[in-house]
């Protein structure tokens, strides 16, 4: 499964332009099975969603249209207003119009995201072209119990707006998640600035050994791609069945 990560410089509060420029990046990298965009890729990350969050679905409609036109899945998160509540919602959109959604579980309390957004309460795994994919958003990366592989996925997608001062943590934790869960990991961060932070990217695809197999250049808009090879993953898991020795646990939610 060919996966393209799209490291974008997001124009604050302008979904029309951000979607248009994302489409051009997708066109430049035609022929993939999956395109992954950053957290809140159409507006920029906002902890105060009033006036920014979408209620009429502009970005989701764009994702559906783009998925249908390319024959590929489109993934990324969007700020959503729904029945008076706000969600940081990760959409995974297939070419046939099917939409799988995950609401960010771990809201960023340091930035007051928890004061305005409603957290999700369930993990979501989507199957796409023979690969089982766990959907995660930004701050979820810091909480390994939530993302622990229970034998139910082969790849994790992390979409993020992860600021420059903490980018070393981003890079280290992505590698850790790939190794400990014996899976592929794609981490897609943004670049540029918003009213609160600067972002330098660090978007990568990592294999189950913890090796980087695709990487975007730092501090610039960039695309990179890699193949998710299920034959290689299954052979590794059969030869070194580390997941069979994992500790049993039960989540409270």
Image (cartoon, rainbow, N blue to C red):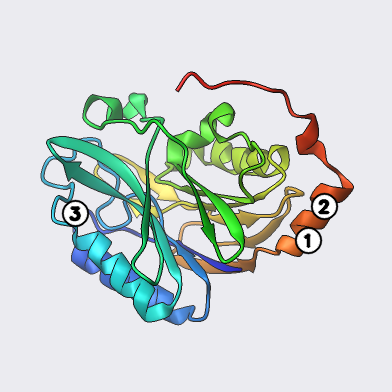
Q: Earlier in the sequence, mark 3 or mark 2?
A: 3
Residue tagged 3: 13
In this rendered view, identify the residue nearer to me: 142 or 195: 142
Q: CA distance from mark 3 to mark 2?
A: 44 Å
Q: Residues within 10 Å of mark 1 (few under 14, many from 20)?
A: few
Q: Residue at x 36, y 80 (%)?
A: 69
Residue tagged 1: 232
Q: CA distance from mark 3 to mark 1?
A: 42 Å
The C terminus, quarter of image:
top left
- Image x and y of residue 121, in percent: 39, 30
Are circles 2 and 1 on residues that touch, CB within 8 Å? yes
Q: Against 45, is 222 above or below? A: below
On the rendered structure, is 30 left or right of 99? right
Are circles 3 and 2 on residues that touch, CB within 8 Å? no
Query: In the picture, residue 228 is in which quadrant?
Result: bottom right
On the rendered structure, is 18 left or right of 156? left
Q: Residue at x 31, y 66 (%)?
A: 63
Which type of secondary structure does the marked residue at label 2 adopt? helix
Q: CA distance from mark 2 to mark 1?
A: 6 Å
Mark nearest the camera among 3 and 2 is 2
- Image x and y of residue 23, in percent: 34, 74
Q: Earlier in the sequence, mark 3 or mark 1?
A: 3
Which type of secondary structure does the marked residue at label 1 adopt? helix
On the rendered structure, is 198 left or right of 174? left
Q: Residue at x 31, y 68 (%)?
A: 64
The N terminus, quarter of image:
bottom right
Residue tagged 2: 236
- Image x and y of residue 249, in percent: 63, 21
Q: Against 74, is 84 above or below? A: above
Tag on residue 241?
none
In this rendered view, identify the residue nearer to me: 30 or 99: 99
Mark nearest the camera among 3 and 1 is 1
């Amino acid at each position: 499964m060919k996966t393209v990560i799209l490291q974008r410089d997001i124009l604050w509060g302008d979904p029309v332009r951000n979607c248009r420029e994302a489409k051009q990046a997708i066109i430049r990298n035609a022929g993939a099975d999956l395109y992954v965009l950053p957290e809140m890729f159409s507006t920029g990350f906002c902890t105060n969603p009033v006036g920014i969050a979408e209620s009429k679905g502009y970005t989701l409609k764009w994702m559906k249209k783009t998925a249908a036109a390319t024959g590929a899945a489109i993934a990324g998160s969007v700020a959503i207003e729904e029945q008076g509540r706000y969600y940081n919602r990760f959409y995974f959109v297939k070419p046939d119009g099917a939409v799988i959604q995950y609401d960010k579980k771990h809201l960023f309390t340091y930035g007051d995201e928890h004061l305005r957004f409603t957290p999700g309460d369930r993990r979501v795994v989507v199957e796409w072209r023979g690969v089982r994919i766990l959907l995660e958003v930004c701050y979820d990366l810091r909480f390994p119990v939530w993302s622990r592989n229970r034998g139910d996925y082969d790849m994790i997608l992390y979409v993020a707006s992860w600021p420059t001062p903490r980018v070393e943590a981003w890079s280290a934790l992505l590698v850790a998640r790939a190794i400990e869960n014996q899976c592929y990991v794609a981490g897609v961060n943004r670049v540029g600035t918003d009213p609160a932070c600067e972002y330098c990217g660090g978007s990568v695809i990592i294999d189950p050994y913890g090796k980087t197999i695709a990487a975007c250049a730092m501090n610039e808009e960039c695309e990179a791609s890699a193949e998710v090879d299920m034959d290689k993953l299954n052979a590794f898991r059969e030869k070194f069945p580390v997941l069979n020795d994992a500790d049993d646990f039960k989540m409270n939610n």
